[in-house]
Image (tube, grey):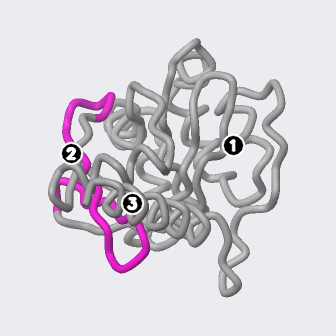
Amino acid sequence: MFILATALLMITSTSVSAQCSSSSKHKEVKSYSADHKDIVDIAIGSDVHTTLVAAVKAAGLVNTLKSDGPFTVFAPTNLAFERLPAGTVETLLKPENKTQLIDVLTYHVIPAKVSAESLVTAITAGGGSFEMTTVQGHTLTATMKGEHVVLKDTQGNISKITATDLNGTNGVIHVIDTVVLP
């Protein structure tokens, strides 16, 4: 029975990782070589994370996210930021809202390296969900929805992981389709 469960878990992990890594409908993440790049450099090299990079710079988090880590970043795409209510991004980028911007961005970061495979394993071991404490201090809950890993924020919003395991020298990035909020 244990062998069967392990085999099913490995098949599920591979399926989720493969489905999150590529999508015939949404080509949001271009292939990017992460050789000797940290997670900030990977994001800078992605044409679908320009809003995230601008926000990280405005929040003054570049040096922090270039440090040794390890970090797991759930990185919203530009489209994810566009889905926020009108004016939200512009408001967060104002200097007087830097603290709130830092809260939102650090809510997308886990202070450990969590691969797609280990995330699926943790969800399975947790009976269908896995809570992660973010750098910001609140939790994100990972679950499976069909063959996809989804994140639920503290407000009940759901974000699907659309690409996984963009590995850098100090952690890993998983791309998400919705901005999660503390």
Q: Earlier in the sequence, mark 3 or mark 1?
A: 3
> Based on the displayed image, in which of its 4 quarters is residue 78 positioned?
bottom right
Horizontal side of 114 relative to 180 (left or right) equals: right
**Residue 150 is covered by the magenta coloring:** yes
Disc 3 residue type?
Answer: Leu
> Based on the displayed image, in which of its 4 quarters is residue 137 positioned?
top left
Compare residues 182 and 8 and report the one nearer the observer: 8
Residue at mark 3: 9
Residue count near mark 2 (Cα–Cα under 10 Å), binned few <14, some 14–19, many ≥20: some
Of the residues tagged 3 and 1, which is closer to the observer?
3
* Tag 1–tag 2 contact (CB < 8 Å): no
**Disc 3 to disc 1, C-alpha distance:** 30 Å
Under circle 2, the secondary element is: strand
Outermost residue toward the bottom in this view: 25
Residue found at x 48% / y 36% = 72
Under circle 3, the secondary element is: helix
**Residue 160 is covered by the magenta coloring:** no
